[in-house]
Amino acid sequence: MTADQRALFVHAHPDDETINNGATMAKYVAEGRGVTVVTCTAGEMGEVLVPDLGHLAYDKDGGLGERRKEEIAAAMARLGVTDHRWLGGFGRFHDSGMAWHEDGHAIAGDFVPDNAFWNADLTEAADQLVKEIRELRPQVLVTYNEFGGYGHPDHIQAHRVAMYAALLAAAPTYKLALGTPHDIAKIYWCAMSESKTRDSIRQMREAGDTETFEGMDPDGEMGPFITPDDQISACVDGTGFVHTKMEALKMHRTQVDPDGPFFAGAESGHAFWGEEFYVLVKGERGPVGEDGFEADLFAGL
């Protein structure tokens, strides 16, 4: 990778990268910046939301992982991302599955495969990412917070692996066979803005959309999925690339109903996905705009 500025995005399953960072990635690619996506599992145990593809589910015929491998390749092509990698190679770490807690967030399910990412040795998994970090030498790394966004065990493990790998990659004496040490200047966690979410839900309800964010009260408790605005550091305005993001999201055919009211193109939905928010957890905050946020993850570098 020859770009002077390089960002590394670490995600748990195919489609996570597009949902969380699709507009940012498309924008950075268009600006000539280096974008690499590392996916930790193939999402073999994910929910299949499209009935005609239900046979691919883990508890039926199987084959969902291979299908999602094709889907993420198509999504990356739509975003313009040419550097997508699987942590340790495709199939090294298996999707762990999940269940829903009564409080509305994800937890580990009753059945977790022996080779699941959730069961992976942390150092072993982190070493796979250390190699990528030392090769790519990114200035920016993006992953989830310690809750994995919504509690999914693979998201939590991706957070742990990314954070530990960033630390190990910088250590001057750590496993030099994995490459020359490199210290990532800025690390961000993905976030959903509280004010943005509340405003969007209000607009959707006024437009008659009662399905998107079902059960969430725009004036009530938001839960652990949402980040208060005073904790957010950066907002990347990707509105110019939101249609690219939505088209890429449709490539994840098993995970997204293209005719659904949110993903298919209600303007409120598009507006919601156009701005992507981040919490800076390592590095110096760069210049901010009138909204109090950095407009660029590379700000100050």
Image (cartoon, rainbow, N blue to C red):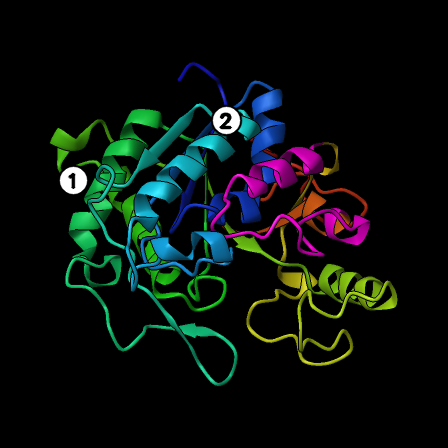
Residue 248 in the image: state x and y as whole percent.
Answer: 57, 37
- Please give left or right for residue 169 compared with residue 205 in the image: left
* Residues drawn in magenta: 241-270
Q: Element type at marker 2? A: helix
Residue 91 in the image: state x and y as whole percent.
Answer: 22, 44
Indicate which label's residue lies in the foreground, 1 or 2: 2
Mark on residue 174?
A: 1
Q: Which residue is mark 2?
A: 77
- Please give left or right for residue 24 compared with residue 167 in the image: right
Residue at image point 16% right, 49% down: 124
Locate residue 70: give its quadrant. top left
Q: Is 160 in front, or is 209?
A: 209
Locate residue 117: give its quadrant. bottom left
> How many labels were placed on the picture?
2
Amino acid beneath label 2? Ala
Residue 183 in the image: state x and y as whole percent.
Answer: 35, 36
Mark on residue 239?
A: none
Q: Is 150 in front, or is 97?
A: 97
- Is disc 1 in contact with disc 2, using a CB cutoff of under 8 Å? no
Up-down relation of residue 274 to residue 155 (above or below)? above
- Please give left or right for residue 70 compared with residue 176 in the image: right
Q: Quadrant of the N terminus?
A: top left
Residue 85 in the image: state x and y as whole percent.
Answer: 33, 33
Residue extending farthest to the top is: 2
Amino acid beneath label 1? Tyr
Q: Is residue 53 visible?
A: yes
Residue at image point 44% right, 66% down: 147
- Please give left or right for residue 249 compared with residue 275 in the image: left
Determine if the magenta segment contains residue 258: yes
Residue at image point 66% right, 68% down: 213
Q: Element type at marker 1? A: loop
Distance CA(mark 1)–CA(mark 2): 35 Å
